[in-house]
Structures are given as C-alpha cells and as structure tokens.
C-alpha cells in the first residue's frame, strides 16, 4: 500500500511533535491510510499459504498476493524487497533501542529497553510487507535465544537482532552462525566470559553444538564439548574503559574481544578434526566452520524449519531441505523455498498458534492500529510469551501442546481488541458492524461470544493457522 502525499506531509510535520517510545503520531497517520475493505478470506488455499508465510492473513496481504500471483509473490517474499511503509519506519525511528549502541543504552532503564525491543517486534510482525523475513527473524531469534534479563543482555540484544539476525534471516546460515559466535549478547548469556584456560566453562560450547548447529542427536561427545570449550577460551566482550595505546586496531567498548592471555593455545581435536597448537582466535573460528558444515547441522535445521512451517515431521521434506542446505552452503532461502511449495505445507494439519503469532495475526486480520506498546504487551505476558524473556537457551517451545492451556486468555484478548479495551490499539469503525453481528444482541461477556470473536479475528477455529 502506498501512502499519499498528504499523509507524507503529515508525517514530516508531526516528526517534531512525536513523543518518544512507539511513535503515537504514526498511528494517527495510519488511521487515514487507505486499506482494503474489511472482509472474510476468499480462498482457503491462499489463506493457508499466507497464514504460514506471514504473521496472518489480512485483506491487504491477499490483495497483494492476487495482484502478483503465487509464484511472483513467493519470489518477492523470499527476496524481502517490498518497500517498508513510511509510517512503520517512523514508528521504529522513535525507538532508542534501534538507534543507540549497547553501551549508550546502559544509561536507560533495562525495563524500558526491553519494552522497546518488544514493541519493535510487534510493529514489524504486524505491519511490515516483508512478512516472510519477519517470520524468519522470529525463527532465528528463537533459535539463537538469549534471555534479555540476564546480565546486560537487554542492551546488547538490539545490535545482535539488527546486525546479525535481520541481516541474514534469509541469507547465509554460515555467516549468521559465525557472527553470532562473537555476539556480545550470546557470549555474556552463555557465560563465555568466564571461559579461560585455567578453568574452562562449557556452557557456550555445549549449546553451540546441541542447539545452534548439530542438534542434540548430532553425533558429538562430551569430549567434543570440552575441546570446543578450549577453542573458545578467551572469547570475551570488551569492557575496558581505557584501551591500551599499543592496541591496534582499537577495539570499541561493548564489542567482541579476544584475550590471548586467557586462551588455551594447545592442540585440540574436535569432531574428528585436528586443530594444531598456536591458532589463537582461529581455533574458535575453525570450530564454527566445522560445525556449520557438518551433515548433522543440515538435518537439525531442516527438521526445525519443516516443523516451524508445516507443524509436523516429514522425513522426505526434511531430506530435501537438508539437501538444499548442503548444496547451497547454508543458503536459507534455498532451504525455505521447497517448504513453501510443498504439499506438506498445504495439506498438513492446522498448527496451534503461539501467543505472539496469535496476537499479531489478530491485529493483521482486524486491520488494527496499534502502537505495540506496554498495554498490548501485557496480553503477551498473560499468554506466556513476552518476547526476549525465555530464560532457557532452547527458545520458546514450538510444539502443539505447550500453548494448549491459553484458551481463555486468547478469548479475552479478542474480546478486548474488538471493543477497544486495549490502550494504544484500536480497530477501524467499518469492522464494528460485523463484530456486532458475531456477538449478537446484548452486552454480556460470555465464553461463547469470546470464542466467536477469537475464531473470526485469528483464523478458523481461532488458534490455528
């Protein structure tokens, strides 16, 4: 959807008056932005594909799909080359977490930074036209999960998200995993700052193999974990305020630093590969190269991606995706494309939406106007999925049963969204006649009325896609 010259001028004039946070002025511009009329999905097959590729069907999304055709639409989503709307760009530009470095963010309260990170995730998932990219950002952020409440994770998460995950979400897994290995957020979260030659810390080494690359059944041993930990000794975060005048090139505070004095420079043996003594920082870099090229990594990622998009296992589809990983040297687009074109995606059973998917799908289906702020985030907290707050390194669960006990909070969210009870979030007036028809006469809050609303706003049977 394009924005009119009038609205562009309004945005420019409002910039000087915009409040901090999630960009309230931009939400006013969105109220006047032309969108597709409120209606029901027209084709079940199109709806299924859009529900899997995006954060939920919307009339605008279906119109784009119909205008381009299936093949061109998928190609555009894989390239992620749709122009981002100016109102979304304006909202995001007001967030300190997206325009300040980690060490600068430390002057802001941690809770505020986390709120802004969550706000950005909601706004992008709801309004970005590059929906497949946003789904993959969500996937990889969960794959490389960090807990924002641990240490200084909240302050470093934004840089990791913007410069590593978002830059490579549909690009190279090899590049993403290699850059992630030097991410200050990850190194702090998994305690690698305490990994020194005198007392090796195995936390990061274990998760690198078990979660990020080979998978829990990937064929590594405890000895491999110990050897990987030795390779990663001395991988730290620069925390010195005064850098040595002899250090060249200089290292900025809050970035990766290799401490050669803390590194075990002896010979190692990892996953059948000899790593000679004296390698320094290249020991860890060689470990990453070995891990991302391991056949188990292809199988592990294929399994996760197929499950993410189709909701169930398929050995034949997983084999095709793993083959694409191997032949393309970890190209994510090459892995995702066969899933999007598969019968398994189109004919599989419905998937229970996770809370984040459910909330964003409801906002998109209702053409809602939201600031992504704390009031709507409270619903995600009640539903059990506040973004970036899963404490374990395995990320939020994606299985069907982990979210089965969230039915009543989902109904409550749908009812509150429909009747304007969420501060900072509204739906357009043209939706109200249909909502009134759904809930019928009277104002009593009943389970049946909430169920019907949730069913209408999210997807068939309300929690599925």
Image (tube, rainbow, N blue to C red):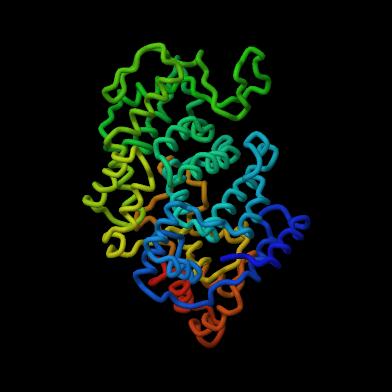
Quarter-of-image position of residue 158: top right
* Figure label count: 0
Q: Nearer the viewer, residue 170 or 398?
A: 170
In this rendering, position of residue 221 left or right of residue 371 = left
Q: Residue 390 appears at what percent x and percent y?
A: 48, 46
Quarter-of-image position of residue 416: bottom right
Location of the N terminus by quadrant is: bottom right
Which residue is found at the position 66% from the left and 40% from the top? 100
Q: Is there any visible trace of residue 311 in the rendered image?
A: yes
Q: Residue 345 appears at what percent x and percent y?
A: 31, 60
In this rendering, position of residue 319 left or right of residue 368 = left
Instruction: Identify the residue at the far left of this view.
Output: 316
Q: Nearer the viewer, residue 14 or 274?
A: 14
Q: Is there any visible trace of residue 411 in the rendered image?
A: no
Which residue is found at the position 34% from the left and 26% from the top? 225
In this rendering, position of residue 421 left or right of residue 361 = right
Location of the C terminus by quadrant is: bottom left
Instruction: Identify the residue at the far bottom of this view.
Output: 441
Which residue is found at the position 71% from the left and 53% from the top? 20
Q: Residue 349 appears at what percent x and percent y?
A: 29, 64
Quarter-of-image position of residue 132: bottom left
């Amino acid at each position: 959807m394009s924005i009119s010259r009038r609205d562009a001028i309004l945005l420019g004039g409002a910039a000087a008056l915009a409040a901090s946070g999630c960009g309230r002025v931009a939400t006013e511009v969105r109220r006047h932005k032309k969108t597709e009329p409120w209606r029901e999905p027209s084709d079940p097959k199109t709806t299924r594909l859009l529900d899997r590729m995006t954060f939920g069907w919307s009339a605008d999304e279906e119109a784009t799909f119909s205008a381009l055709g299936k093949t061109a639409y998928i190609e555009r989503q894989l390239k992620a080359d749709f122009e981002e709307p100016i109102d979304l760009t304006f909202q995001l530009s007001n967030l300190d977490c997206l325009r300040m470095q980690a060490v600068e963010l430390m002057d802001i309260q941690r809770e505020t930074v986390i709120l802004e990170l969550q706000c950005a995730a909601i706004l992008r998932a709801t309004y970005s036209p590059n929906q497949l990219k946003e789904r993959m950002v969500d996937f990889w952020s969960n794959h490389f999960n960090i807990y924002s409440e641990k240490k200084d994770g909240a302050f470093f998460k934004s840089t990791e998200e913007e410069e590593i995950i978002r830059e490579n979400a549909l690009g190279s897994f090899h590049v993403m995993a290699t850059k992630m290995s030097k991410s200050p957020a990850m190194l702090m979260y998994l305690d690698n700052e305490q990994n020194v030659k005198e007392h090796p810390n195995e936390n990061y080494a274990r998760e690198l193999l078990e979660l990020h690359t080979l998978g829990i059944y990937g064929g590594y041993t405890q000895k491999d974990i110990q050897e990987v930990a030795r390779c990663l000794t001395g991988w730290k975060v620069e925390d010195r305020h005064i850098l040595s005048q002899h250090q060249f090139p200089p290292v900025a505070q809050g970035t990766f630093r290799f401490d050669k004095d803390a590194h075990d420079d002896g010979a190692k043996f990892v996953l059948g590969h000899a790593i000679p003594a004296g390698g320094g920082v290249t020991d860890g870099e060689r470990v990453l190269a070995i891990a991302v090229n391991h056949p188990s990594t292809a199988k592990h990622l294929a399994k996760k991606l197929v499950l993410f998009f189709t909701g169930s296992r398929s050995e034949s589809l997983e084999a095709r995706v793993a083959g694409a990983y191997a032949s393309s040297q970890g190209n994510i687009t090459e892995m995702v494309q066969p899933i999007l074109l598969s019968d398994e995606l189109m004919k599989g059973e419905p998937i229970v939406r996770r809370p984040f998917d459910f909330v964003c799908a409801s906002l998109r289906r209702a053409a809602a106007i939201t600031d992504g702020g704390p009031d709507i985030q409270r619903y995600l907290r009640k539903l059990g999925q506040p973004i970036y707050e899963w404490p374990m390194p395995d990320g939020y669960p994606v299985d069907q049963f982990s979210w089965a006990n969230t039915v009543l909070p989902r109904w409550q969210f749908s009812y509150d969204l429909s009747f304007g009870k969420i501060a900072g979030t509204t739906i357009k007036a043209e939706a109200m006649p249909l909502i009134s028809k759904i809930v019928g006469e009277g104002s009593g809050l009943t389970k049946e009325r909430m169920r019907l609303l949730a069913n209408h706003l999210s997807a068939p049977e309300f929690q599925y896609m």
